[in-house]
Image: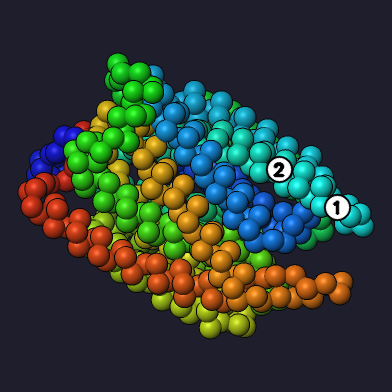
Amino acid sequence: MTTRTDTPTARTARASHPLGARTWAAVILVGLVGQLAWVIENMYLNVFVYDTISTDPAVLAVMVAASAVAATVATLVVGAWSDRLGRRRELIAAGYVAWGAVTAAFGLVGAPDAAAEAAPAVIAAVVAIVALDCIMSFIGSGANDAAFAAWVTDSTVPANRGRVDGWLATMPLVAMLIVFGLLDPMTQAGQWPAFFAIVGGATAATGAAAWFLVRDRGVAPRPSGVWRSVVDGLRPSTVRREPALFITLAIWCVIGVSSQVFIPFVLIYLRYSLQLDDSAIVLGVVLILASALSVVGGRIMDRVGKERYLLPAVAVFAVGLVAMSFARDFTWVVVAATLMMAGMMSSIAAVSAMTRDCTPADRAGGVQGARMIMAVMLPMVIGPAIGAAIISGTAHTYVELGREQPVPGPEIFPVAAAVLLVVPVLAVLRRRMLRRSGSGTTAPLPPAPEDAG
């Protein structure tokens, strides 16, 4: 890892390399549509399974965990591969096209016949949907979490990462807003094949556009093999060599676990537990407000510093979670959910930018594998399992067609908030570690200015 002190000269040099229009267009388009596909995988696929296949929360937890493992393997391999090639564009463009095709294929998975004694049919449908979800996660993570995330690191410097990650942090919220505003009525009407086809088509079209928008940054290819790079990135010696990077990833892991305690179940909670008739409007208002706050927060982050910004953002996240456990009507759900989502995305933006600052310049792709394990796989295995256990333990139900169905209760939110208590401890340890080592800002050199074309 190369450590450079952030001198006034260095800051001036970085400031002279602003992001160009093409880079911003690629960041916004590829980032947004990637999150659109992840909204389908992380949230609406759960609703699809709940509505058409099984209401057992354990099924959702298993599906989320399996897809997280597949996504992590893809990010490890494709990230190291992109470092070896020294290129990201082909992996982004081709990956998004394939990602879109697999997303559209979800509409071909048929629901079991509810009128039949359908235990074997339910099992077959669950196996099919989990397998397809793993394939989708593998392709999507290779394109988005490995290649695209590494390209963003290649294309940015510490002075502008707050803004970039602030915008990227809003992408899940904007994607949810688009889905809720334009496509949610299709899910309410059970038009799942058309729903998946539209999102899949948009994802594939973005892959074609990425071929023209994304420009590789001249990163030198790594001579080591892909598998050697994958193994090296996970060795204990690498953790000892990059302590600031891995403790930053540990902070991200805790924030991710907290998020995954409630995210897989939040749509079901709003729709079936609170029974809000205007749930789509609630979500729309929340996502607009939280997105605006996250963008403003990114600019503040660049001014005050990522480390100083992190803990207040986490505190807002925790307050919103606690407030959600008490909110029952339209107004209070909007207030609580806005705090919750804005705090969550601001926390992720801060820790994401901190991770980029700690990333060695020649291993941006390889680091995505470690990030995927800490920030995605572990949270998606641990968080939903906690949420499912809480739901099963509290035994909240609703009655539909004379049958009781399990639903999430408000208890998932304070438990998610309790997980966040670990973040300040890790933040203090990280600060002491950096103070002991006497390190300044860890960062790659500024990327070359973008060509005018």
How many labels sit on residues?
2
Question: Helix or strand or loop: what does disc 2 sit on?
Answer: helix
| Residue at the farthest top position | 223
Residue 181: x %, y % from top left? 67, 59
In the rendered structure, the answer to whether residue 358 lies left or right of residue 342 reads: left
Residue 438: x %, y % from top left? 7, 49
Residue type highlighted by circle 1 = Ala
Give the vertical position of 178 relative to 68 (above or below). below
Q: Residue at x 25, y 60 (%)?
A: 426
Specify the quadrant of the image occupied by residue 394.
bottom right
Residue 127 is marked as 2
- Nearer to us in this view, 159 or 397: 397
Residue type highlighted by circle 2 = Val
Residue 232: x %, y % from top left? 30, 29
**Which quarter of the rendering shows the N terminus?**
top left
| Residue at the farthest right position | 115
Judging by the rendered image, the residue that carries numbered circle 1 is 118
